Amino acid sequence: MTGAGPAFGEGPQEREPRERPRDLGPLAEELGRIAGAEQVITQEHQLRTYESDGLLQYAVTPAAVVLPGSAEEVQQVVRACHRAGVPWVARGAGSGLSGGALPIEDGVLIGLARLRRILEVDLENQRVLCEPGVTNVAVSEAVGPTHFYPPDPSSQIVCTIGGNVAENSGGAHCFKYGFTTNYVTGLEVILPDGELLRLGGRELDRPGYDLVGAFVGSEGTLGVATKVWLRVVTKPESVRTLVAFFGSTSQAGEVVSEIVSGGIVPGAIEMMDNLSIQAAEAHTGAGYPEDAGAALVVELDGSDAECEARFEQVVDICERAGADSIRVARDDAERGVIWKARKAAFAAMGRVAPNYYVQDSVIPRTRLAEVLGRIDELSDEYGLRVANVFHAGDGNLHPLVCYDGRAEGEAERAEELSGLIVKTCVDAGGSITGEHGVGVDKKRYMPDMFGEPDLAAFQKLRCAFDPDQLANPGKLMPTPRLCGEVPGPYRQHPLEAAGVAERF
Amino acid sequence: MSRSGSEVSRHSPVASRHEPGTADELAELLGAAGEPVRIVGGGTKLAWGGPVEAELKLSTAGLDQILEHNAGDLTAVLGAGVPLARGQQKFDEAGQMLALDPPDRGATIGGVVATADSGPLRQRYGAPRDLVVGVKAALADGSVIKSGGRVIKNVAGYDLGKLLTGSFGTLGTIVEVAVRLHPRPERTATAAGGTTDSATLAAAALELSHAALEDLSLDLRWGGGDGALLARFGGAAPRPQAEAALRLMKRAGLDGSLVDDDEGVWSLQREGQRSADGAVVRVSGVASQTADLLAAATRLGARVVGRAGLGLSWIVIEDRSSEEAATAVEELRRDLDPSPCAVLDAPPEVRTRIDGWGPIDPALLGLMHRVRERFDPAGIVNPGVLP
């Protein structure tokens, strides 16, 4: 296998319906023997369920879907695929937004939804051991009310820990608390040749390479995790939340800078622009003023005394910056209302546009005003509206490029505009993706961030885990690459051979 | 490219040391080496890991520029050879810090990251792996590669920064590090509770690790029949939290007091992780194991510094013959099984008697070697330092 790419990789394409079942040969039967025939899907109309992840513009049906019920079955499935030389994609809830779980046309999709047991809750040592199909929110529920699991993607009710591991998911609270990678201490993984290994464990700093750190965020290209050790933390004493409304995003952006440079590390600090406020308000009726230029949600958590002191500081900063109004949540219900509008922002965009592209770029926070200005210019130039919702603390923008897919050429223009926004962010010293992952959707932007030697180094890691490139090929890397043989244990350097540098 | 001091010359009669002034120059030397190379930063942890036999030494000391300090973004980019203390001094001017406080002794940022060393602030801010947002490294083939970036949130590409962190140079020589900074707490206060009973100390440590307090650090120390639990708080109003911690300590049977001017207390904790002539065993354990760990250390007459909430401990065995010290390490491994016990500082006579890293699952070791082979096929960089 040479890691032949998926059916496409250059942006959205039309789905090509396929009626003829693909022939996996004896592998199809073997999958049935491993997981039970009822857990293997090969009928085209049933395969449709798995044709896309959360990013619907990409759709491919795999040759087969298998739903193993245990780590042992996952191992046998992976081993069988390896023997047959068939590529595979592991899938959790399929709620990812980069096409990372997009199936491979002639490959197998391994659904992990049946591996959803929480195996161990060790509150004394603040660890949870779970299977990959466990939902994100289930972990916090299992350790509450005293503890919680900090990474909280907006999709936390459905998304799975296995998917979070693959994508290194973030969430609204990661400015203070960090990402999935900061909370995974160990993994049981199946390598693409079927070998079962434990990386890390319950303990920190085990001797050897930090292969847990390399695996988390590798988008399913290094293997599949079958058990995950997570660190959970104690719940803070207090949580205080406010939303402040400003005339413009640049005004709100200055407030963010002032809060952060004032030594305050909010649990969350989120911004919405006018268009997203309008959409969210129409959707939720949370009471955000529809004429506000920007809404800034600030949440502080920690000890009572610290929260109190800091909260006053934040209110003061907002007032001095000329906030039009400030709403402070007096209880959990009011806090819920404030968050409702923010969390509904993506879903609400349907109210203002039939279709949208969402990006996930990151910029250094201090470049916010400049980048938003450039996005406005581009938006005018293309005659397309761009809504902005962002995790302001860590500079993670989610520009939503609105378009009408029925209007001739508008989807292409929107895609082009979307790409220019990504480039603007990279040029400002940022990243093409903060939390959604590269997947198929952003791999074309990888060369904007990484040069040839960098990509070659990525490939070295890939080849160490998966020399046959059977695990989720065609994702993350911009173009397919080979894994060469490892040279022998000793190579004579040309200079040495020439007698130039035999001894220093 | 090479300056005269770092010219690759023939027939050098003694082991040679090169100190390139740029990342490219370092990469070029590495690519042309063709023989084992020892990478050196501040030279403060050369005794860690297995012995490295290499006549050629490549120092990062010349890569000593603070390349960026983006105060508004709370990030910085440092040459690998920048002494950690010099970086901190610079960040301090802006009321910021890099939240890494391993025992210093002149360590460079590159060395701290390459060895994944950490100190008491880990309780709140994490380890080097959690604070490094990007790296640039010279690989054995002479290429210079980067991973990550300069922003604190970024999932583009594989996280080679984590792979290189703690790899002791064996996958690539870190030449530049981009880090996340934090506001330096304007005030700190420490609650300190003492006891002469190790079981009481362990129980109190566990109790404190579950309190709804935001501690910067939660450490313990134990040795010679005497110990203390230390909880440090920082921010606008650290004292109420320190007082709350003190109340919990007293309820758990410790004799406590508050320390406002607490820098000295924590400096001792950091230094407790090192030993000039003894053996230091770093135990990767869990918090609930503390009582057993203190009992084991007591039996051996060793002293302990521990991150009470994280299950990480440094057991220091001093004033022993090398044979006794080696036996003590084996005893610890038996008593604390399955927690890995890695020997960090140790005199050469002790090191030759033991396996410094301890047993590692052969399958995992196989994967580690496959990773190593991809990055350094000839195995020339720091050979032998890792298992």
Image (tube, coloured by chain):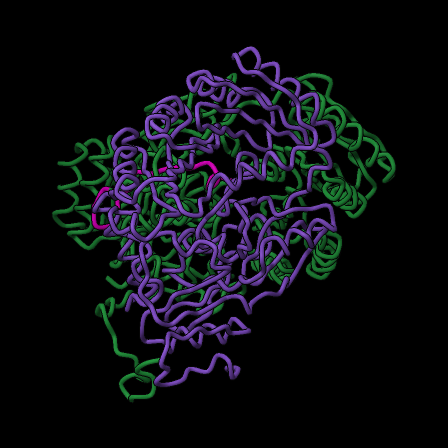
User: Considering depth in this image, is B6 or A183 the residue closer to the camera?
Assistant: B6
Which of the 4 quarters of the picture holds residue B169? bottom left
Could you tell me which residue is drawn at 75 percent across and 45 percent down? A257
Could you tell me which residue is drawn at 57 percent across and 63 percent down? B79
Residue B92, image x, y percentages: 70, 49
Residue B244, image x, y percentages: 64, 17
Which of the 4 quarters of the picture holds residue B373? bottom left
Magenta span of residues:
A179-196
Residue B355, image x, y percentages: 26, 47
**Does residue B289 appear to the left or right of B59 in the view shown?**
left
Residue A195 among those drawn in magenta: yes
Q: Is residue B182 above or below residue A460?
A: above
Residue A90 among those drawn in magenta: no
Spot the purple chain and give its letter: B
The reply to whether residue B74 is visible in this rendering is yes
Q: Is residue A491 above or below residue A198?
A: below
User: Considering depth in this image, is B12 or A492 the residue closer to the camera?
Assistant: B12
Could you tell me which residue is drawn at 70 percent across and 40 percent down? A272
Which of the 4 quarters of the picture holds residue A166? top left
User: Considering depth in this image, is B33 or A179 the residue closer to the camera?
Assistant: B33
Q: In this view, does A296 lie above or below B107?
A: above
The reply to whether residue A170 is visible in this rendering is no
Spot the green chain and give its letter: A
**Does residue B293 appear to the left or right of A261 in the view shown?**
left
